[in-house]
Image (spheres, rainbow, N blue to C red):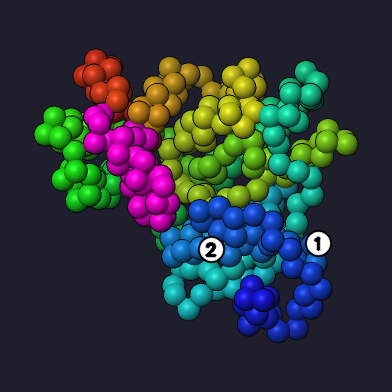
Amino acid sequence: MEKEALIKKYYSDFDIESLQFLNAGYDSEAYLVNDQFVFKFPRHHIAAGNLYKEAQVLLEIRDQLPIKVPEVKYLGQSQETGQMEFVGYERIMGEALTPEIIRVLSKETRAALAKEIADFFTALHSIKLRRPIEGLTINKKEKCLKEFGFIKSVVLPAVTEESKEKINTIYDSILGSKFSDTNCLVHNDFGASNVFFDIKTNKLCGIIDFGDIAVYDRDIDFVCLLQSQEEGFDQAFVDMVLSQYGYNDLETLNKKNSFNEFYAQLENVFLGYSYEMNELFEESLEALKKGISDYERQIVIEQNYRYYI
């Protein structure tokens, strides 16, 4: 098998007794090896770079968090600087939270779970890395400029003159804004499916999937939390997490969340193309050809571009 040969390329003495496919996303494929380790293999060069950052950060921070996170055991470092061919982690037991699991948890268990997640964020956001990791820190305006460069070359030629004017105004407004964010280490893709839970003991086992980890606006973790409600974290649960964390600027958070949902119609074209998610790219581009949704409220009336995230 190709994956087994790749592991053996780096660890010739590693005895692989079993190798079971677990799942695949747009970034990586995951395999369970010997029922003890989970190996992630990137599916494209962007994911290979993200996997490198994930492994480097996890090697440093795992002892600084109150909740178990993947422990790096095997590294398949690519010849390309800052990329990985694979990373092998010690398996975290339990299963990913689902709406069905969350619905049957008692009030006390939900409250305890919310506190554990809040404590995780408190610890993660306070960590100062000992050394810089290339590409880990995200600058908002540089991120926006990169997205706008793509939008100008791919989207603007395909949409109406009215939409072109609106899109240019959106980016001019974002790039002209002053941001005063709390920047720190963030998970950057947090949802219920990242939380592994033991339904027999009602205990949290660990938090996984740090592939998008970054130094960025702290609020992205809470925007992700707000947007994970389809996965089972309802508003009441999110409110408990925010309360336990001590988050006290809900107006700003809700505006960031609102603008993030609006901006997704543009960002999804960029992400769909960058990550070779053809269906997302084509659907998003077709939607933009029909016009920019919610433009007047977000840009003209409320000027929420100041809350780009």
Give the residue at mark 1: 35
Q: Using the image as rendered, state which of residue 267 and residue 156 is in the foreground.
A: 156
Image quadrant occupied by the N terminus: bottom right
Q: Using the image as rendered, state which of residue 180 and residue 297 is in the foreground.
A: 297
User: Where is residue 284, by image quadrant?
Assistant: top left
Q: Residues within 10 Å of mark 2 (few under 14, many from 20)?
A: many
Magenta-colored span: 263-292
Residue type at numbered disc 1: Asp
Q: Residue at x 31, y 35 (%)?
A: 287
Residue 279: within the magenta? Answer: yes
At mark 1, the secondary structure is loop
Q: Using the image as rendered, state which of residue 231 and residue 137 is in the foreground.
A: 231
Q: Residue at x 64, y 59 (%)?
A: 30
Q: Which of the two discs, 2 and 1, labels the residue nearer the N terminus?
A: 1
Find residue 191 and report its horizontal and vertical position in percent: 59, 37
Give left or right: position of 94 versus 308.
Answer: right
Residue type at numbered disc 2: Pro
Q: Residue at x 48, y 19 (%)?
A: 250
Find residue 152 and report its horizontal and vertical position in percent: 19, 46
Residue 244: within the magenta? Answer: no
At mark 2, the secondary structure is strand
User: Where is residue 300, by image quadrant?
Assistant: top left
